[in-house]
C-alpha cells in the first residue's frame, strides 16, 4: 500500500481476489476465497487473502459480515441491503428492500442512528 495516497498496491494475487469478489453474491469467507484463488497462485498465503480483505474493508470496497458465528463473511455489495440466512446450511441471500423501522427516541439512549441492517432467518428451499 502506498502510505501517502492510501492506494492499495495491485498485485496479481490481489487482482485475482478482487475478480473473485466482483459480483459474487455467495458472501464467501476468507477461507472460501483462499480456496478459490490459490489454485492460480499456489504460493499465495492465507494472510494475503486476509490482508487484502482487511484493506478492501478499510476502503469501503467490501463489507465484513458477522452473520455466521463460525466465520466472518464478505460482501462486495456495499449498497445498503439486508440478508436472509438459512439456519441449516448458512446460505445467505441479499434482500434489496428498505424497511421503514423507527426506533423510539426513548430507546436510543441519545444515539444518532446512521444506518441499519436487518437479518431474517429461515430455511432455504434445499433445506426445507
Image (cartoon, rainbow, N blue to C red):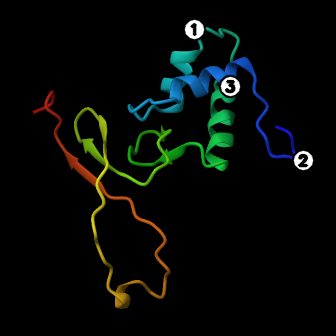
- Identified at 69% across, 27% down, the residue is 48
- Give the labeled residue for mark 1: 39
Work out which residue is located at the far bottom of the displayed protein and give it: 106
Q: Secondary structure at mark 2?
A: loop
The answer to whether any part of residue 10 appears in the image is yes
Q: What x and y, as percent, mark residue 46?
A: 64, 25
Q: What x and y, as percent, mark residue 116?
A: 40, 64
Residue 125 lies left or right of residue 39; in this view the side is: left
Which quarter of the picture shows residue 39? top right
- Mark 3 residue crowding within 10 angstroms, few (<14) / some (14–19) / many (20+): some
- Identified at 46% across, 75% down, the residue is 113
Q: Secondary structure at mark 3?
A: helix
Q: Nearer the viewer, mark 1 or mark 2?
A: 2
User: What's the distance in space between the residues labelled 1 and 2, CA to CA?
Assistant: 33 Å
Closer to the camera in the image, 54 or 95:
95
Q: Looking at the rendered structure, which numbered label has been put on residue 14?
A: 3
Q: Earlier in the sequence, mark 1 or mark 3?
A: 3
Q: Looking at the rendered structure, which numbered label has been put on residue 4?
A: 2
Residue 4 lies left or right of residue 9; in this view the side is: right
User: What's the distance in space between the residues labelled 3 and 2, CA to CA?
Assistant: 20 Å
Q: What x and y, as percent, mark residue 119?
A: 30, 54
Amino acid at each position: 500500500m502506498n502510505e501517502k495516497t492510501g492506494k492499495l498496491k495491485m498485485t496479481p494475487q490481489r487482482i485475482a481476489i478482487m475478480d473473485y469478489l466482483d459480483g459474487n453474491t455467495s458472501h464467501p469467507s476468507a477461507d472460501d476465497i483462499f480456496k478459490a484463488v490459490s489454485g492460480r497462485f499456489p504460493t499465495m498465503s492465507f494472510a494475503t487473502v486476509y490482508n487484502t480483505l482487511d484493506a478492501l474493508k478499510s476502503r469501503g470496497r467490501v463489507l465484513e459480515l458477522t452473520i455466521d458465528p463460525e466465520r466472518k463473511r464478505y460482501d462486495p455489495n456495499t449498497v445498503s441491503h439486508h440478508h436472509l440466512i438459512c439456519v441449516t446450511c448458512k446460505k445467505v441471500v441479499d434482500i434489496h428492500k428498505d424497511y421503514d423501522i423507527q426506533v423510539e427516541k426513548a430507546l436510543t439512549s441519545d444515539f444518532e442512528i446512521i444506518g441499519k441492517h436487518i437479518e431474517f432467518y429461515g430455511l432455504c428451499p434445499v433445506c426445507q
